[in-house]
Amino acid sequence: MTYCVGVLVEDGLLMIADTRTNAGLDDISTYRKLHLFNAPGERVIMLASAGNLSVTQTVVSMLREGVDDIEGEEPEKLADAPTMFKAAQLVGRAIRQVRKIEHDGFEQAKIRFEVSFLLGGQIGTDEMRLFMVYSAGNFIECGHDSPFLQIGEHKYGKPILDRAVTAKLDLYDALKVALVSMDSTMRSNLGVGLPIDIAVVRRDALTLEVDHRIEAGEPYFHDLRERWSAALRAAHRAIPRPPYGPAAVK
């Protein structure tokens, strides 16, 4: 299982992704799921992956080396995409090409073809954008009214993002909320875990402001987890008890 989230606010864009993969309770490994395609001053592209690890790794490798499923054309690399919309289309094409190549093997092994990606960034003077690409290769775009997208085990972190994230939120406040959503997911699903990769870029900067991995025992993340738990307990105590039951009858 995986949890990745991208948040696009007026100040810029951030992505976070866990690194845990498992093929059973006794087969747990760590793999990077947040991939960067950057040329400082020219473009910043972030790609987060969820789903079957062999498929996501093949798609990412194809995007780095070139997608060549259009006859007579040169293979296209994600790092050369002219716009973010074209980049999203290219990710979709790579997924469909891998599906075509691996289809028979997956059918014979009765394995589901499950992948999804978050793609975000900015190319030159193009608008900063954030997309979610599905396993069929189609995609949706993050909007001003819903300034975040998630893939993987999203249900535990979504209520926190729904309540706290708006397009006008400060970029690092958005990062804080995203990390709280990651902590909530980790507490409820053992398939999501440390280390956590973080990437942050400001609008029109065209270079990463943060490229960081949170390892086990990092003081800030530990403090965030403890403060969030304490805040929830305090909120619970501060809310009046429900006016139901025998004690409420006059």
Image (cartoon, rainbow, N blue to C red):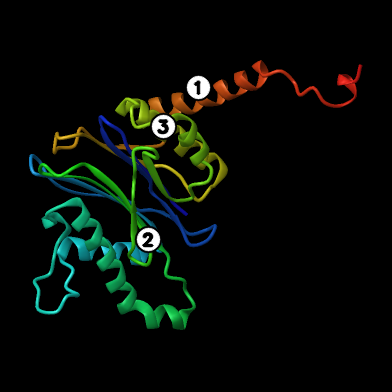
- Location of mark 3 (residue): 165
Identify the amino acid type marked 1: Arg
Mark 3 or mark 1, which has the lower sequence index? 3
Say the numbered circle drawn on residue 140: none
Q: Residue furthest front?
A: 145
Q: Residues within 10 Å of mark 1 (few under 14, many from 20)?
A: few
Left or right of 181? Residue 198 is left
List x then y, in percent, for residue 176: 39, 28
Q: Does 68 sit above or below residue 65?
A: below
Q: What residue is rendered at 42% in x and 77% in y? A: 106
- Location of mark 2 (residue): 134
The Cα atoms of the two marked residues, 3 and 2, are separated by 23 Å
Q: What residue is rendered at 37% in x and 45% in y? A: 17
Label 3 or label 1, whichever lies nearer to me, is 3
The Cα atoms of the two marked residues, 3 and 1, are separated by 19 Å
Say the numbered circle drawn on residue 227: 1
Mark 2 or mark 1, which has the lower sequence index? 2
Badge 1 marks a residue whose secondary structure is: helix
Badge 2 marks a residue whose secondary structure is: loop
